[in-house]
Structures are given as structure tokens and as C-alpha cells.
């Protein structure tokens, strides 16, 4: 049997490649031939050719973003979330061989109608976020580098130029978010109204919520217009290049400006003002909650919600400011893989298999890089002990980060961002918070695993 597959996750960093590796391992165990195309943050790799697809007996799409399926017409196809390929690769391959045949019989001019809005709000959201994150990371790091070259006020021509470039990249994140949410829903015609909606949201200070709502509004507006606008064949070419763009921009822009933009702006500003007012025990409690969310499902939907919350907190920062919320989110997300690395390679080697000890070595790097998914191999083998232990340490780290008033100016990068002057405030205490949470989780998971091993021996 020959199977072809595509894997893709929201950030395009970890889940994408872990899913691909697990599918390849599962295929090898079953004696199947497989080729996996990864659609990660650096673009498509190991791209499936027309010949690969023609020879395939089945297709697996494991993605939390929208993947174009047109090239798989006439093939048995199963489409699942990327986590299923990580957790149940062998079963997924077997399902693909008996999956329904994918048929896309519509003409090119009607492909918009083939899009399925019911695919899921989460999938559309993940598509938008996956395109947005590189803009936020690049912009935030440029601004941090500007502080490194020119001090807190980014003085000097080089620092000012870098700071301006960072500001441009950060300013593009809302149009990108809105545009690619709409793209996920309605394909290319959704890009124009979606990006316009994102720009309107940015201009009105409606932030993440405004851009997100604008993207959904734009996507479904395109689908509505495409369904009800019918032109003679001679004029059908005007629909995608003239009629849909102008009508959708006027409708979506008008609704954003005069109907939903104002209350969304008020909500966004209210949330930000409330967050900025948190001090003392209130901020510590928020850090505790965010830290626990980052670990409880290891960058799953709960962790992603906490991460988006942190990213949104970066958008209203003035020059030289850092976000305590984003800082708590990032450092908490680093704890799970670091704790499992500590336990499996230092504290309790005898409690782990050779494969887990090897995974522990990689987990050091993944943890320092803020890739929480590095703990997934351990959680899959022993979910209750591992998830319980790392959640406690992550929650503690988030609370300490808030208590120490640590802040960060970028949404990703992990420990390597700590080395950039100006990128992290109270960096020494930030490292202490990370070390404490990692140690607590590392010792805790080792202790509960040791207790479990002794119990089994006695039985």
C-alpha cells in the first residue's frame, strides 16, 4: 500500500513535524509506503508530486489549518486534526484505506461553493493565526534589537530604522489575521475584504477580537455573495476581479466601521485596561491560571487560547514597554519539556525507556525554544502523572513571573530572546521563575513515577 499525507499545525513549528514523523513510523511498522508533505512555517517541504498522488491508495490530511484538497480528487481521503496523527498514527493509516473517495466535481468558477463553512471555526482561526505569528515574531524581535542597538528610546539611525521595520511588521499582523481567516473560509476572494477588515480593526484599536471578527465576516460575506450573485456567462469573469472585491469591501468595511467595530473596540480597550490594572494577588492569580492552561493540554486548544491572550496583550504596547501577560504565557510553556528533560535525563533515568531518554535530550532544546509539544511523547505514555506534574510547575512559573513583574516584548523565541537587551524586563527573576517551575515539575513527576513503579513491584 502507498499512502500520501499532509501535516500542518497552527504555528507550523512542532506539531507539523511530529505528526509527519509519527505517520512515517506507523507506516514502517505496517509495511506501507508513505510520503508526507509538511506545510510548516517555512512553507511546504517534501511536496507531493502529481505522480505521487496518482500512485497513492489513500490520502491522509492531518491539519489544524485549512489545506487545499483539489489535487486529491478521486482518491480515498481522511481529514483529521494534526493531534490525531501524533496520538493515533497506525489507526489513522488504516482508516484512510477505507475512507470515502473525495470528489470535487464543481467547475473552477464555482469552487467557492465547494468550501465547507461547517469545517469548523477553530480550523479557520488556526489558519489565520499560522500566517500572523511570523509577522508578530519578526516585528517584536526587530523592536527588541532596536532597543539593543539604541537603548530604550532606540536612538540612532540604525536603531530607528530597525524599530520602524519592526513596527511595520507588527502593524501588518491584524490585516494578515483577518485576511487569512477569510481565505480559509472563502479561498482567494476572501483575502481582500479580510485584510481590509483587519486594517479597519487596527485603525479603530479593536485589536485581536476586531481583526478576528472581521475575518469571519469577510469570509462568510464572500460565500453569501457568491451564492446569490449569478451573472451571464459572458460576464462571469468580472465576478472574482471586480464585483466580489468591491461589494465585499463596502459591505464588510461598512459593518466593521459603523456596526460591530465600536463595541468590539470598547470591549478590547476594557479588557486591556482591566489587565493593566491588575496588581498584587490579582496578577499572580492570572499568571497561575495562564500557566496552568499552557501545560494542561500541551499547546492544544486550551494552551492556544492562553497563547492568543498573550499575543493580544502585545498589540497596545508603547515603545520600550513589555507585556507581563505574554511573559507569563511564554515562560510557563517552556516548563513542560524542560521538566520532562530534567526527569528523564538527570533525576530518574531508570524510570524511562531508552526512547524516552533520547526524547528527553531533545526536550531540553525544545523547552528552551518555547515548544511545549516536546513533552507530548511523555504525556502520551503516562498522561495523568505527566500532565498533572507539569501543570503544577507551569502554574507556579506563571504566578512567579507575574509576582516578579517580568515582561517580554515578543511572542516567541524562548530562552534565546532572553539574550537580547531590552526584550525582557527583570530577566534575572524571569530565569528564576523558569528554573523554579522546571525543578518543581521535574522532581514531582519523578516522585510520582517512582511511587508508581514501587507499587507495581509490590503488586
Image: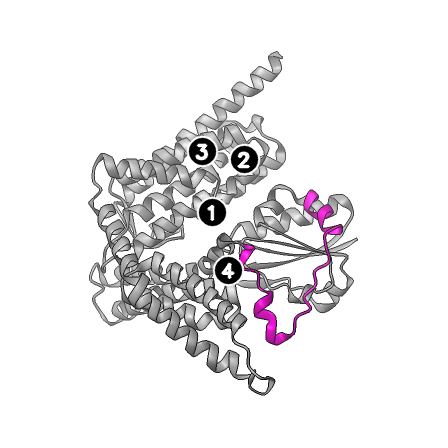
Q: Residue at x 48, y 55 (%)?
A: 126
Q: Identify the secondary structure beneath mark 4.
A: loop
Q: Residue at x 42, y 68 (%)?
A: 194
Q: Residue at x 35, y 37 (%)?
A: 289
Circle 2 sits on which residue? 379
Q: Nearer the viewer, residue 399 or 200?
A: 200
Q: Neighbour class for label 4 at 10 Å: few (<14), some, many (≥20)? A: some
| 430 relative to 4, above or below | above
* Separation of residues labelled 1 and 4 (CA atoms): 14 Å
Residue 200 in the figure: left or right of residue 279:
right
Report if the CB atoms under discs 3 and 2 are less than 8 Å apart.
yes
| 204 relative to 443, above or below | below
* Separation of residues labelled 1 and 3 (CA atoms): 14 Å
* Separation of residues labelled 4 and 3 (CA atoms): 27 Å
Magenta region, residue range: 90-119
Circle 3 sits on which residue? 390
Circle 4 sits on which residue? 41
Q: Residue at x 60, y 64 (%)?
A: 68
Q: Neighbour class for label 2 at 10 Å: few (<14), some, many (≥20)? A: many
* Separation of residues labelled 1 and 2 (CA atoms): 14 Å
Report if the CB atoms under discs 1 and 3 are less than 8 Å apart.
no
Residue 129 percent coordinates (x, y):
44, 58
Q: Earlier in the sequence, mark 1 or mark 2?
A: 1
Q: Nearer the viewer, residue 181 or 373?
A: 181
Q: Nearer the viewer, residue 116 or 6?
A: 116
Q: How is the image coloured?
A: one colour
Amino acid at each position: 500500500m502507498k499512502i500520501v499525507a499532509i501535516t500542518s499545525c497552527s504555528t507550523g513549528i512542532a506539531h507539523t513535524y511530529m505528526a509527519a514523523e509519527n505517520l512515517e513510523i506507523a507506516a514502517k511498522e505496517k509495511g506501507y509506503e508513505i510520503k508526507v508533505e509538511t506545510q510548516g512555517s517555512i512553507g511546504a517541504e517534501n511536496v507531493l508530486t502529481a505522480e505521487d498522488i496518482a500512485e497513492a491508495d489513500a490520502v491522509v490530511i492531518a491539519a489544524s489549518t485549512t489545506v487545499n484538497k483539489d489535487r486529491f480528487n478521486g482518491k480515498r481521503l481522511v481529514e483529521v486534526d494534526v493531534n490525531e496523527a501524533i496520538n493515533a498514527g497506525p489507526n489513522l493509516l488504516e482508516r484512510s484505506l477505507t475512507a470515502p473517495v473525495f470528489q470535487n466535481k464543481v467547475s473552477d468558477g464555482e469552487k467557492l461553493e465547494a468550501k465547507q463553512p461547517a469545517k469548523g471555526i477553530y480550523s479557520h482561526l488556526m489558519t489565520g493565526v499560522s500566517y500572523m505569528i511570523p509577522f508578530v515574531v519578526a516585528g517584536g524581535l526587530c523592536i527588541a534589537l532596536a532597543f539593543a542597538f539604541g537603548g530604550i528610546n532606540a536612538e540612532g539611525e540604525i536603531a530607528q530604522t530597525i524599530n520602524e521595520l519592526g513596527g511595520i511588521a507588527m502593524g501588518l499582523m491584524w490585516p494578515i489575521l483577518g485576511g487569512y481567516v477569510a481565505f480559509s473560509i472563502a479561498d482567494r476572494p476572501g483575502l481582500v475584504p479580510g485584510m481590509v477588515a483587519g486594517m479597519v480593526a487596527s485603525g479603530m484599536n479593536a485589536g485581536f477580537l476586531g481583526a478576528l471578527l472581521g475575518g469571519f465576516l469577510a469570509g462568510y460575506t464572500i460565500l453569501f455573495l457568491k451564492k446569490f450573485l449569478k451573472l451571464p456567462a459572458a460576464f462571469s469573469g468580472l465576478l472574482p476581479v471586480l464585483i466580489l472585491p468591491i461589494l465585499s469591501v463596502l459591505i464588510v468595511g461598512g459593518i466593521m466601521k459603523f456596526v460591530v467595530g465600536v463595541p468590539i473596540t470598547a470591549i478590547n480597550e476594557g479588557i486591556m485596561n482591566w489587565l493593566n490594572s491588575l496588581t498584587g494577588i490579582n496578577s499572580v492569580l492570572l499568571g497561575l491560571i495562564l500557566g496552568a492552561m499552557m501545560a494542561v493540554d500541551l499547546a492544544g486548544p486550551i494552551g492556544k487560547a492562553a497563547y492568543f491572550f498573550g499575543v493580544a496583550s502585545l498589540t497596545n504596547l508603547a515603545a520600550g514597554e513589555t507585556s507581563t501577560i505574554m511573559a507569563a504565557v511564554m515562560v510557563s510553556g517552556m516548563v513542560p519539556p524542560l521538566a520532562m528533560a530534567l526527569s528523564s535525563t538527570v533525576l530518574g533515568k531508570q524510570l524511562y525507556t531508552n526512547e524516552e531518554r533520547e526524547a528527553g535530550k531533545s526536550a531540553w532544546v525544545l523547552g528552551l525554544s518555547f515548544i511545549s509539544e516536546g513533552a507530548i511523547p511523555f504525556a502520551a505514555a503516562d498522561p495523568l502523572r505527566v500532565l498533572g506534574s507539569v501543570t503544577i510547575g507551569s502554574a507556579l512559573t506563571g504566578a512567579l513571573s507575574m509576582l516578579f513583574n517580568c515582561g517580554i516584548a515578543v511572542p516567541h523565541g524562548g530562552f534565546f530572546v532572553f539574550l537580547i537587551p531590552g526584550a525582557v524586563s527583570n530577566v534575572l527573576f524571569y530565569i528564576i521563575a523558569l528554573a523554579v517551575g522546571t525543578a518543581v515539575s521535574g522532581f514531582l513527576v519523578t516522585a510520582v513515577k517512582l511511587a508508581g513503579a514501587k507499587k507495581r513491584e509490590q503488586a
